[in-house]
Image (cartoon, rainbow, N blue to C red):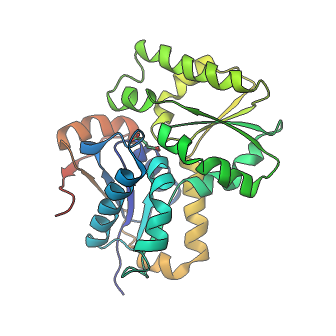
Amino acid sequence: MKKGSIGVFDSGYGGLTVLKELVKQLPNYDYLYLGDNARAPYGTRSFETVYQYTWEAVQWFFKQGCELVILACNTASAKALRNIQQINLPNGYADKRVLGVIRPTAEVIGQFSASKHIGVMATSGTVQSESYLLEIHHFFPEMQVHQEACPMWVPIVENGEFDKPGANYYVQQSIDTLMQQNKQIDTILLACTHYPLLMPKIRQFVPDSIQIISQGEIVAKSLSDYLERYPTMAQKCSQNGQIRFCTTDSAADFDQNGAIFFGKPLKSEHILLGH
Ligand code: DGL
């Protein structure tokens, strides 16, 4: 049987916050990470563009031998996953699987809120797709979901400004606008894999009574359940505890910045998509 690493994809560095948790919860598997840093951010791009970029990346993972790919990017999950699952995979890739981060998060997020008011902070693309509204209501019909697009947060994070004083303005502005939508919000979901880096700043502007949830652990737990439910897929994922990091932009930059997201040093390779 052909075995491959678990593919983990993001527009840039954000997916490393998810990979970190995957490795923590499922350390034996092999992982292949790709950040499309050359074309990040995705959050402000059209549906067609995000779909095209994401499908190119997924095909690259398949060429590298991956049987299972996780879109560790909310924007790609919101704008590309459905087409990939419903149109692309049935056309020649029926045995491969591509999973996203929105459904596993929506499945559990309602459990965190007593007031039944959840704030969702995300990229403009994820907010406009209304994926979180649909998915959360599917699992928790009584939940009120208040979304806030934070277009400045990914550029702040991608440019290494997340712990600098300049970030305070944009973080506070988006938090304040979200909280003005409804005073009963008791849970804030960071629905973008880049945002955990801003956690200390976000915490500064959010009252202690409000919980802030990031997705890494949730997604890792969900993947672990998935691999238990689908042992045939689990068997197709190689287990040597190895991780390979790739980027479509400068490997030197990726090594430097990626280490902050991943929480430890890493060594990446530059690759070209579509080759
Ligand atoms: N990290 C991605 C997400 O979770 C988006 C970042 C971007 O805009 O490229 O939505």
Q: How many labels sit on residues? A: 0
- Residue 110 percent location from the top left of the image: 75, 47
Closer to the camera, 233 or 35?
35
| Residue found at the very far bottom of the displayed protein | 1
Q: In this view, does 177 lie above or below 265?
A: above
Which quadrant of the view contains residue 266?
top left
Q: In this view, does 236 lie above or below 39?
A: below
- Residue 173 percent location from the top left of the image: 55, 17
Identify which residue is drawn at 53% across, 56% down: 25
Closer to the camera, 148 or 231?
148
Which quadrant of the view contains residue 160?
top left
Q: Left or right? Give the position of 165 relative to 246.
A: right
Q: Left or right? Give the position of 202 relative to 62.
A: right
Identify which residue is drawn at 23% across, 47% down: 267
Quadrant in the picture for the C terminus = bottom left
> If the picture is divided into quarters, which one holds ligand 1?
top left
Closer to the camera, 86 or 57?
86
Closer to the camera, 214 or 221?
214
Identify which residue is drawn at 36% across, 87% down: 1
- Residue 255 percent location from the top left of the image: 25, 40
Identify which residue is drawn at 52% across, 44% down: 126
Q: Left or right? Give the position of 23 relative to 219.
A: left
- Residue 149 percent location from the top left of the image: 54, 33
